[in-house]
Image (tube, rainbow, N blue to C red):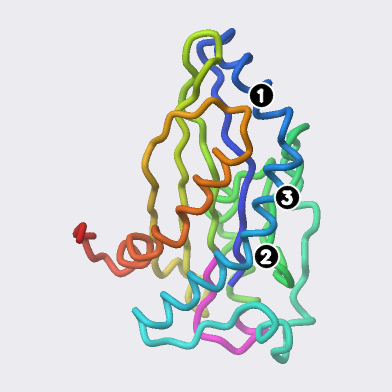
Amino acid sequence: MPVVIGKIDQPIFPLIDAAMFNKKTNKIADTITVEAQMMIDTFRYALAQYMTEHFGIKVWYGKELSMKEGYANITHLAESLDTKNEHFPSLILAEGDKMPFQIKKGDVEDGLDSEKAEMIAKEVCSHLNVDALAISFTHLSVISAGGFGLSGNVVLFTEIIMFDKNGIPLSSGYAQGKYSTINGKYIYEYRNKLKEFPFLNEILVKDMAGIKYTKK
């Protein structure tokens, strides 16, 4: 189960306001990337545990997956991690994960929506002798920028797609956090949004199962 954190989606309009806000984000881009890398293994563990509890299935991930027979035969496409973005140049993978899918410019959704992706999923399942393959993709998005770039509206999105052993898309889930207004120049603002991920697991997994989430 590859787990991926993508680059931040940055606002384009209004042109001047967005440019001024993005300048603040870009200035701390390296630190944001480090924060995301530090959190991603926790993301993977939390999601795997919740899927295990909810579906009653065995989820292979991390070190246990990397030691599974056939894992060495899975091709890792390092070029698929290249986002072509100057400030956030690479997709982030959890430790030990491989990226077998062909992804262009960091667009994971587009890369998984193809016959080629289905063929790859089937091949991976065959190598690992498993019934399904899931890939999770999470990213921050700044929806808009305020006047003179003094603030931005940010949200955390997370998705998961599961293919069966024949490469056929079996299920998918989607969840998003709450919109928050941030200044944009402080690392803790982005860190706090990333920390919402574990709380989105219930929504994400229930969406996979076709169950409407009810707030407790």
Along the line of sight, the residue nearer the viewer: 27 or 79: 27
Please identify the quadrant where the C terminus is shown.
bottom left
Residue at (72, 69) in percent of width and height:
95
In the structure shown, which secondary structural element does the residue marked by tag 3 occupy?
helix
- Per the image, the residue denoted by label 2 is 94
- Distance between the alpha carbons at the discs numbered 3 and 2: 12 Å
Q: Amino acid at mark 2?
A: Ala
In the structure shown, which secondary structural element does the residue marked by tag 1 occupy?
helix
**Residues at badges 3 and 2 in contact (C-beta under 8 Å)?**
no
Q: Amino acid at mark 1?
A: Lys
Q: Position of residue 140 (x, y in %)?
A: 53, 42
- Dot 2, how many residues are within 10 Å of its Cα: few (below 14), some (14-19), or many (20+)? many
Name which quarter of the figure residue 100 lies in: bottom right
The range drawn in magenta is 125-135
- Distance between the alpha carbons at the discs numbered 2 and 1: 27 Å
Q: Position of residue 11 (x, y in %)?
A: 54, 23
Along the line of sight, the residue nearer the viewer: 134 or 155: 155
Left or right: where does residue 60 sit relative to residue 86? left
Disc sitting over residue 100 in the figure? none
